[in-house]
Amino acid sequence: MKILGLGGSGHNFSACIVEDGRLVYAIEEERLNRVKYALFPPDASKVKLARNYAAKYCLKQAGYTMSDIDYVATNDIIDPRYISKYQYKLQTYNHHLTHASSVFFTSPFTEAAIMVIDGSGSEIGNTQYETISFFYAEGNKLNKFFIHKGNKSKENVYEFLPNNSLGGFYRAVTEAIGFHFLEDGKTMGLSSYGSDRYIDDFHRFYTYSPHHGFLQSDQDIQDLKMFILDELSLSKNSFKTKADFARAVQYHIEELLIQLAFSIYEKTKSKHLCISGGVALNSVANSRILKETPFEKVYIFPASADSGCAIGSALYLYYVQLQNPWSPKEEPFSPYLGAEYDAEVMEKTLEEYKEHLCYRISKNIFEDTAAFLNEGKIIGWYQGRSEIGPRALGNRSVIADPRKIETRQRINQSIKRREFFRPLAPAIMEEYLQDYFVDAVSSYHMLYVNEIQPSKAHEIEAVSHIDGTARVQTVTRKSNPIFYALLEHYKNLTGIPLLLNTSFNGSGEPIVESPKDAINSYIHLGLDVLIMDEFIIERRNGFND
């Protein structure tokens, strides 16, 4: 049984291949068309979306044509242009259902409560759209037992979110303080620089009760935006005021999510919680849910935004609609689902740049890379199959020595050219997690935030956020053997079992996918060295982009 899954909504398009229940390839459209979130200008989107590079990529890598595919699966709010070529084999499912399927059928649980929380899901009535959904799952059964709804205009289905939406609440503040659509991660990073000044004020702009849930009218949203803009117009320190607003919305989202988690626990009494939807990428909130609610274990899908709906729709079709038996895998979900480019392809690509770059094959790539890192070099690290989701997890990463704060400053200011307040993450050998972080839990997908041990803070200044926390990726020999080997060599050299790990991309760009992407980014970002498989790549003397 071969299934092509297609994901997205008005953004975050993706594709995957599921073969007999096994996820074999998955890729986000942005990695191939090189447009962040695949958000095209309106005049260009019709043709470019219809090309659907992700589907072609997955079919090619799997060695299939469409005649080999039994079904195509998607969700019901995807832009119709993206699925236009695949209508004749298409099965379409509720948006939140595909989110729930993506997180449960990749989880380690035989049964679980599932929260899906995003900006907007499927239409469930006249101008009414789902914003929060609760499920209970066991085996290959998914039962949706609660839906929270909001209203929005049909004329603006891809531009505006409904009311009564936690994702809409966060987005309203994100945009009011000057960030763009889908830049909520910046608000989360900025929130650590803020004070509690506006926390009480924000209670005016919504209501919450266990019976009625989260209620925020269109007027509440407009009043909230006007309040923010008025305060900013009077502010003598706009950065501090924006940080205070970021702190306020982050606080309220955390409190609301915790209350929702308690609510679904009371309804299911499950020990396991799965979370999906775009709001599940809020790693600070995830950590509080894990620590402050009755759930013993929490799992978050690494591609929790709408790109994950490709995987969710394909797995739902296989396990639920076709009634195939399901049981969790012994190993944690592996997000490394892209193509693996061989050395011949890499060398052929490198030859195109030989006028400006020199390269050699390392006899021990781990020793050489660890030595570069110890010298303070910032490295583009390109290995194996690309990751699905917004986090670089050791295969398409920029890596560096975590010990000096100057490293973080150089990466943010000169290399990635992004805001100084955005934190950089550590990747750590799992067995040393407790040595460096307080009461930390393993996070193979970098979806929790942990407090740094005070005794270790001076050792890892480059990955310490202003509040003394870090969004940690734990690495084992099984989860990522190559990245683990590098961490091991670096520890043997320096005594430090972790590295700074951030995504391999420039400001406003998707993470690199192909060797050519990696080389171009290496050149344009001003990285010191590019390590690609066993190739060590550097600039020729006198060459600068």
Image (cartoon, rainbow, N blue to C red):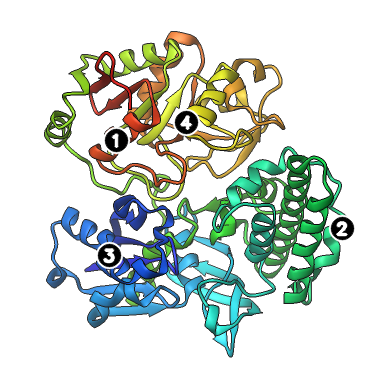
Which numbered circle lies on residue 504? none
As measured in the structure, the alpha-carbon distance from the residue carrying label 4 to the one carrying label 1 is 19 Å
Q: Which of pointers 1 and 2 lies earlier in the amino acid sequence?
A: 2
Look at discs 1 and 2 and give the one toward the viewer: 1
Q: Quadrant of residue 239?
A: top right
Q: Of marks 3 and 1, which one's residue comes earlier in the chain?
A: 3
Q: Is residue 222 visible?
A: yes
Q: Position of residue 393 (x, y in %)?
A: 42, 38
Q: Amino acid at mark 4?
A: Asn
Label 3: which secondary element = loop
Q: Nearer the viewer, residue 227 or 391?
A: 227
The answer for how far apart the CA atoms under marks 4 and 2 are is: 37 Å
The residue at which mark 2 appears reads as: 201
The residue to which callout 3 is attached is 52
Q: Are marks 1 and 2 in contact (CB under 8 Å)?
A: no
| Tag 1: amino acid | Asn
Residue at (79% x, 76% y) in the render: 211
Q: Earlier in the sequence, mark 3 or mark 4?
A: 3
Q: Is residue 154 left or right of residue 361?
A: right
Q: In the rendered image, which residue does mark 4 sit on?
A: 501
